[in-house]
Every structure is written in structure tokens, then in C-alpha cells.
Image (spheres, grey):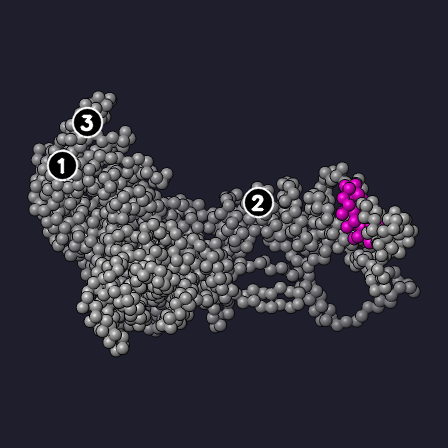
Amino acid sequence: MLTKFETKSNRVKGLSFHPKRPWILASLHSGVVQLWDYRMGTLIDRFDEHDGPVRGVHFHKSQPLFVSGGDDYKIKIWNYKLRRCLFTLLGHLDYIRTVQFHHEYPWIVSASDDQTIRIWNWQSRTCISVLTGHNHYVMCAVFHPKEDLVVSASLDQTVRVWDISGLRKKTVAPGGEEVMRLPQQMNADLFGGGDAVVKYVLEGHDRGVNWAAFHPTLPLIVSGADDRQVKLWRYNESKAWEVDTLRGHTNNVSCVMFHARQDLIISNSEDKSIRVWDMSKRTGVQTFRREHDRFWILSSHPEINLLAAGHDGGMIVFKLERERPACATHGNVLYYVKDRYLRTYDFATQRDNPLMSIRRAGNAGANQGPKTLAYNPAENALLITSDVDGGSYELYSIPKEAARGDTAPDAKRGLGTSAVFIARNRFAVLDKATNTIQIRNLQNEITKKVPTPCATTDAIFYAGTGMLLCRSEDKVTLFDIQQRSSMAELSTPFIKYVVWNNDMSMVALLSKHAIIIADKRLGGAQTVHETIRVKSAAWDDSGVLLYTTLNHLKYCLPNGDSGIIRTLDSPLYVTRVAGNVVHALDREGKNRTIQVDNTEYMFKLALHQGRYDAVVAMVRSGGLCGTAIISYLQQKGFPEVALHFVTDERSRFNLAVQCGNIEVALQAAQALDDKDTWYRLGVEALRQGNYSIVEFSYQKTKSYERLSFLYLIAGHTDKLRKMLKIAEMRSDVMGRFHNALYLGDVKEQVRILEESGQLPLAYVAAATHGMEEDAERIANKLGGEVPEVPDGASALLMQPPQPILREENWPLLTVSKGFFETLAAKGAAAAGTAAAAAPAAAKGRGVAAAAMDIDESALEGAGWGADELDLGMGGEEGAAEDALDLGGEAGSEGWEMEDLDLPADVVAEAQAAAAGGAAAPFTAPAPGVPASQRWLDRRTQLAAEHAAAGSWATAMSLLHRQLGAVNFEPLKPYFMDLYTAAFAVLPGLNGVPSVMAHLDRTWSGETSTQPPSSPTLLYGLSSLEESLKAAYKLVTEGKFSDALRAFTRMLHIIPLTIVEGRKEVDDVKELLAICREYHTALRCELKRKELRDEDMARNAELAAYFTHCRLQPVHLALSLRSAMTIFFKLKNYATCATFCRRLLELNAGAKIAEQARTVLTACEKNPSDAVKVNYDPRNPFDLCALTFTPIYKGSKYAEDPYTGARFTPDCKGQISPLGDFVRIGADGSGLYISPAQQVR
């Protein structure tokens, strides 16, 4: 049995596969209906309206509906898209066992403990027929998949087949139903209508029959009963008879069914087993057992080879045997096994030929067909492995001519879990029993034995001549057979397949949910994680890995980037990739050819390899588009390339700002022409020091204050004068005063203050600056209220400094333009080459000119004035050249410049140095991807790594999905600590910001360069163990409040801890259980101490509950002693005696034991309780961690998805007190703290 998906829940009583989507419905004994995605392994939805167990559930074939029936006598029809119940059908008088939609008509059949079967029309919402005849509970009723028949099974020991053709004729006839139904409704309800009649009554079981089912095509019925037997029945038009009985179950048979595609019968039972029977031989083929869970229900997928079984602890989705064809590719030929034949497929001619028959072992059962196939081209030999006899191999020599008939050539056989060719005439076989690798020749003779590199090696894979990849529990080892040494190791999840490229330089290691790409020495490993199972992979000639999951064809680049190529209708196994053609095998062994568009991954590959000419060619071809490519380029640090894909001006503007391309940003801002865009352009231009564009942006946004300040720092006093006039025209008093202040124009300042009525300030300004006439005039206006001017002997006048440098743009470092920079500007391709070598100052003047070419008429009439702004761009270059002309004409005046007689080699060396410097201007490095982003690129599911990388939103999302966390305030300090611990801050020089350095968990001083892989973490198992010891000590000392805080801190830290192996995961889960018990116990005891003597009965209850928490023996002894004292004082001697006996069983100290015996003797003299207390020591219970009330076995409860603490149902939806961050009753996938928890 190949388990594909497994859930843990209450007992599952009903199952139903969706006919198209990868969904399955599970109805639980707790009253909940769960909808699961079995591919993703996630709970999609839950439906909770039934009161009591739900025993039957079924999907509709085409509508978004399902039906459920439960112990509340109700049949509910649900719409899973609307996520609600549409209506309820009432009529049954007892528990409803099964419900099912008809495959064609709007009917539902239901079976009930009221001894009837009802057929309902779910469109008219009425019961159209009642089938009576059984005289005990009807356990199931099922429509025939094609004919007008219903089969039912009952505890009256019979199976009945009902003919409902009359019902079909009556309801399909126009108006027939309405005319006939009404007069007979009462009789039909009481005695059953004549529309459905019993055709056969099958008697043969000795006990009640639990299940019966039709064969999908043959006239056969199978039934299972409490007599532990499975019976096979055949029927024709006139009669039905028993064919055979299948015996083997050791308890009641719960459910039985025919396999949809093979001649098999599957049954399950309360004996905790699933059995598979050969229908033709009538013998058992396989048996699958569980240790503790009884099976109750079976279901099969209507389209694909999947089965599901429900048991006491949840359900499993499984297949009976592997469907992957064993295959191997060599050159242009595919060798594969189909229907016990070795076949070849020529990729070039697309011809398929059978080569020879493959003999199947006589004792081979299900799931024991060919598993792997290896081809040896040198000797034309074939090596096939299977699971027969616990693992075996067969060595075939392929005949030169195709074999005819079923004659199979003799094969050389042997035992071994894995077998692969390693040389022209040698192959290796893994013998797990002795932990050795046997080297055999083509006569199947052992030539050498080599010990495995690891004691837990369980599979070997080809890795080149004389080399093997050995798989062990959590790693893969590259092993040299000749040297008998390990060449390299790589930590991996459980690897299932290994795929090499054509030149054996790259390898892909495929596990269930991950792909690891590495070089031939297992170096430079990159991991791609998948949520859906990985099925196959193949390399194309360019070095890209194409792989399939259950429903997608995807690609993976050597750097670990992956993406989707197309969706698949059914799983495929890739055999070869040639250009844009993918060859694959399907599960039926048919060769499929798929045309794919490889533009996207070839573009990313060219970008990764730095082949920018190919990138430009793909961009110009226009084959790429979409936001996914743009976001990829942004993420990888190529926003300038993304500019080529974008036609939307706003997106172009955002990208241009991101990559610092001010020219493209200016063009986009002109097209958008809105205030926010101009403001952002101004900010970016200011960052680059492009004064002209900053000025123009401020003009467009009418940012007068910013513009004035810009003119101040740039030293443009003439433009400040114009800003002063504009402010006066706008009647902006503060703007006028600021500009006058920037200009140092005191007269203007005094005038503004005087005009605005601020006469005291105007007087002080005039008097301070020595303007006596103006001061006298203003003093006359003030009269006798002239303010006193302080002595200014030590004061300095506030005058603006004189500008030192007056440049149009601030000086920039000369840099060479990037490959894509000039291509990004519209229409600038021709001028881009010259601009790349020009100084940045000249480039700035060109940009300034471009900026000022914009129509400025929009600024007129807005207070700007009619005069143009003088940007001072004329005549500077010529003046500079004249000033530097030092030579002049030969004559008596001027500098005497004589030629120096220098050696020729010195001159040549100097010229070469100058040429080299001119040819290699400084190229500013592109900003790299932050280490935190690299950490997240691994798509880790560990919340601690996301928190350490600073991605708190994704960390919270993971904790919500895994643990049901909703309140993250308690976790905030731990998030901060993780983030702080993952980085080191290196102080810089004065005035220079500090440098953040990432601290990587996998850093090694022996490696020169290594990319970031995972952050250093603060919390580990050892620190948790130390915290636990300290908490134990606090409990022993009776410091309960301090101990509670210690356990709460541990509950907060555990989800943010990362450990390596599965054993450590189990240790952390055990520690979590300890924290849960102590946290609940301590809160219970603190609650008791708050009550004191107010409520003695409740006080005693809490003391008793305290003793039922799973504590360490020393603490349990103390709690029992406390409870014994309280109950003895309360005169509840009977209950007190139970505490005494438990205390004596603990083997506590001599003093405590003596006291317990004394109290027990006193209690046994009067074994009664004086006060009624809600505590029953004989009835097992769990303690509600919130209300501190008992939840007795069998009662409903809600659970904390993080700690597993139980609560009364009315607590559901509240925040769990164990850590105060998890919602009670929320759905969660469970604690995830290690990469080793990846499901195999």
C-alpha cells in the first residue's frame, strides 16, 4: 500500500472523493464534515451543523454540491462554493447511515436505522419513494452505476436488490410525478410505494450485514457482515445466487467494495486491517494493518487509481500499487516496461517496438512489478529491480531480434534492494542485510564486496563509472568503489530518484516534496521545495531541469529559480527534453509528446549566465510579458531589464526610479503629469544630485518652500529674488519673509513686517541692523510702546553664507553606463554609446536641457512671472578651455615650456598606463540581494527563519497556518531577539552609517565564498532544557508565579526554535507536553489560592484536579499531599483515602509515607464525604485548561492546536491561556521546527 495522504481527527465514518478536483470529504463522529485537498495535504473547509455523528457523505458528480446524513435524523445538502447548507431533508425517524447522489437523476438515496430506505428528489426537496422490507437497521444503500437498481444491506442478515425502473418511468414521464404522487403520499410514507420493488433477497450471512456494493460493469455484488465474512454474489434477470465466501477477517467487516480498474475486492474491518482479495482466485493478496485503529469506511476515486479508508484516528488516502513505468533513456531511444513487455521508443521516428517478454515472478503480488530499469549500451544488457521477495533484481541480455510470442529469455536473478550498472561489464547490488555493496559481473558472479559508507544506507544510484550515490536516512554520499572512500556528502530529505544531465556535470536529487540540484561533486547545492509531490525530471541541453509534479510541468535553473511551464491533466513522467519538445510516459505506459514554450526559462537562464545579447534579443522578440517576469527581474536586481517589458507609464516610472534611470523616469513623469509622480521624481533626482530635474519637479508641484531652499543651497540668489516676487504676487507673507531671510535683504524683511502689522518686530529688526531712519519712523507709529533693543555687543547678525560653488548639477563620479541603461530610454539607442563615456557633469547638463524643453506655459499666470529662469548653461565650456590654454604662440612673453628629453621606454609605459586608465572607468557595483532575501528565497516553512530575516508578516502567517496563532503581541519580543541575533552591526567612520552584516548558520571559515543559506538562531533545544531545569527548581521551591512565567516563556520560544533531526523534534514535542501540563497545573493551583476559604468545595476541587496533571513524581507527591490535607480537613474521608493510596504508590519519602498511612487508617474508619465535590476519581477525565472543570471520556471538547490542551466546547474561539497567542479550536497543521519534518 502506498500511502499518499493521512489525517488525524475523530473517528471517520463517511468518505467521498470529488470526481474532478483533488478533494476528499470526511464525515466525523464528532459531527464535523471536513473537506481536504489530498494533494496539498491541507484542510480546505469544515462544515459543522449536524448535531451528533455524521455517518454518510457524498459529492455530486457535476454540481458544486455534497450531501450528508447524521444521527440527528437530518439529510443536509451543501454548496461547497457558498460554504453553507442549502436545505435540510426531514423524514427519517432514526440515525441515517449512508447517503448517495444518483449519477444521472436529481435523486438521493438514504439508509436509516428506522428500517427504511428513502429516495429523495433534491431539486423539488421531497421524498419520492420509501423502500420498506428490512426488519432491522439498514446499514447502507447504493445506486447501481448504470442500471435502475439499488442494493441495501441490513442487520437483519440480508442483502436486498431493489428495482427502481418504475420510479424512473414515473418521474421522467411529463407530469407523471405530480399526478400520481399526491393521493398516494400517505400510503407511501407508511407502507412503501410500488415504484420500487424488491428484486432479490440475498440470504447467507449469519450475522448482520454492514455493507453491500455493485460491481461497476459485471452483474456482481459483494457484501461484508458481522460474521467476519465477505461474500460474492452474482445475479441475472431472474435470480441471484452466492458465488463464494472470502474468509480471513477476525472481526466485523465494516465495508467492502470492488476495485474500479482491477479484478480485486477491497474490504476493511474492525480487526484494524484492510484486505485485498483476488476476485478470480478468491484468495487474499495483501493485508494492511494498523496498531490501534479500527476501520469503518472505504471509498474509491471514480476516475483515478486512489482509495481512501476511514478509521478511529482519521483517514488515509492510498494506492494499492505503483503506477510509474520503469524506464531508462539512452541516446534517442527509450527503454521501458509495459504489460510485462520490454519495449523501445525511438524519439526521432516516434516508433514503438516490443523487444522481449519480461517474466513475472510466480509469487509476485500487488505492487511488485518492475521498479527501476537500467540499460547497459556496451553489452546491450538490462537490469530490472522490483520488490519481489523483499527486493530483487533480474539481469537480461537483450536479443538482437525482437522475441515473438510470450517466450521470455532467461534472466539471471538475485536478491538486493538496489542494483545499478557501474561499468561496461559490472553492476553493483546493495545487500542491506550485511551492509555491503556487491560488485557482480554479467554472469551474475560476485567479484568484490565493499562495505557501505553508512550503516543506514538503504539505496544506491549510478554516479558515473565506478561511482555510486548512496542514500541513507538524511543524507546522500558520493562513494568511490575503487578507493572505498566517501568523496562527498550532502544533507537531503529522503531521496527517491536521481537524474544526471548528458555530460554528468549536474545532478538532480528528487525527494517527495523537494528537488536538490548540485554539481558532480555534490557542491553548490540548490533546493527547490514543492507542496505537491514531485514525480519525475529530465535535463535539457542548455542545463535547465524540467520536472513534473502531480499536476504541473515546471522548470528549475541551476541557481535554484523555478517556475511553471504548463498544467497537466494527469501525472506524466518526463523521459527526454529536446528544445521545446518534452517526451513523457503516462501511467498507462503510453508515450506522450508535449510542445512547450521555453522562452521564459531560457530568458532567465541567459540573465543568470550574463548573456545579455540573448536577453536583448528575447526582449525585442516580444515573447515575454506579464507581472511575473517583472517581479522576478526586480527581485533579482535587474529592474533596468524590466523596463523593456512595461508599456504602462506608471510601472515604467516606478521601475526607472528603482533602478535610478532618471531619464526614463522623466519621460514617464511627463506622460503621467500628476503631483505625486513629480514629487517622487524630485526625491530621486535630489538623491542623484541632479539639480535641474529637482528644480523642474518642484516647479511642477508648486513646492515654493522646497524650491526656495534649493536655490539657497545652490547659491542662485537671482532666482531667490524671483521667488520673492512670486511670493509677493501670491500674497504669501511667510514665503516673502523666508525668501528675504535667505537673501539677507534686511530692508525687505522690515518692509514685510511693517506691512503685515508686526510693528514691534519691524522696529527691532531695523534698530538691530542699524537702519536708524526706518527705526525712527516705526517708533513714531508705535508711540510710547517702543520695545527695548538688547545690547548687541556679543550678538551676530543672521546673514546667509555666500555660495562657494555654483553648478547646474552637483559633481558626480564618472561611471560607465550599464548594458541595459541606454536601451531603456525611448529613442536614445544611437546616442547611448557616446553618452556612456561622457563625464557625468556634461550628462547632467543634457538632462537639464531636456527638462527645460518641457512646456513652461503651465507656470505662467500662477505667480511665477513672465521672465525665464537663467540656468547659466552658456559659455562655460569655452571659457574653461581658454583658461587652460597655457601654451600660446612662440615669443618673448608667456610661460617657457621646453620639451623634455625622456627615455622612449618611460614614455611608452606612461602612454600605456594613461590608455588603460581611460579605457577602464570606474563602474559602480550594482546593489546585491540582501542576505535576508536569500534566506527567504529557500522557501523555508520554518517561522523562526522568517522572523530572523525580518519578514515578520510571513512568520506570522506560517504560525497562523501551523498553530492557529492569532495574537502575536506576546511573541513580539522574541521576534525582535531573533532578528537582532541574526545580524551584526559594524560601526563605521564618523558620519558614515553602520554596516549590517548577516550571521549565517552554515558559515565555515574553511570556505572562501559561500552564499547565505540560513540565519543564525537564538533558541535551541539545549537552552530550552536549561530553562526547564530552572522552572522545575522554582516549582520545587513553591514559587508558582515565577515558575508559571518560566513555562509561559518556553511556550513562546518553542515555535521559534529550530532543531536538526527527528529525535530532537520528538524531544521538543515532549518538552511542549511537559510545559502544557505544568502551565495548566500551576494556573489551577494559583486559582485555588485566590479562593482561600470563600468556597471550600471549589477549593477542594481545584486541589484534586491539580493532582491529575502529569507532573514529575516529586511535584506530584507534593500536590497529592496538599490535596490529602485539604480533603481531610473538609471531612471528605472517602476521597481523601484515594489520595493517600496514590501517594503510597509513588514511593515518596519515609516521612510522607508514614503520614499517608496514618491518614488512610483514619479515613477507612469513616469512608464518607461530608461535602459534595465535583470530582470522581474513578472516571478518567481531562482538565479544561481555561475553566478548570473535568472533561470526562467520551465528552465533546475543543483543542488547542499548538499544545494539544483540551477545553470545554464553549471555550472554542477564545484565546488559549497557554501562551495567550493561539485560538482554541483553530485548524493547524502542527508544530514545524525542523527541515527533517518534511513528509516522506
Who's the residue at 76% across and 51% down the image?
711
Most foreground residue, 1039 or 389: 1039
Q: Is residue 1013 magenta?
A: no
Asked whether residue 735 is drawn in magenta, I would say yes
Visible residue check, residue 418: yes
Say left or right for 365 vs 1072: left
The residue lying toward the viewer, choosing from 1212 and 902, is: 1212
Q: Mark 1 points at which residue?
A: 161
Cα separation, mark 3 vs mark 2, equals 68 Å
Along the line of sight, the residue nearer the viewer: 24 or 977: 977
Residue labelled with disc 3 = 185
Toward the bottom, the furthest residue is 1150
Q: Residues within 10 Å of mark 1 (few under 14, many from 20)?
A: many
**Left or right: 1105, with 566 as reference point:** left
Lower sequence index among marks 3 and 2: 3
Determine the secondary structure under disc 3.
helix
Question: Nearer the N terminus, badge 1 or badge 3?
Answer: 1
Magenta residues, start to end:
722-750
For the residue carrying disc 2, how many other residues have a C-alpha within 10 Å: few (<14), some (14-19), or many (20+)? some
Residue 1114 falls in image quadrant? bottom left
> In x, y percent, where is residue 1155?
25, 74
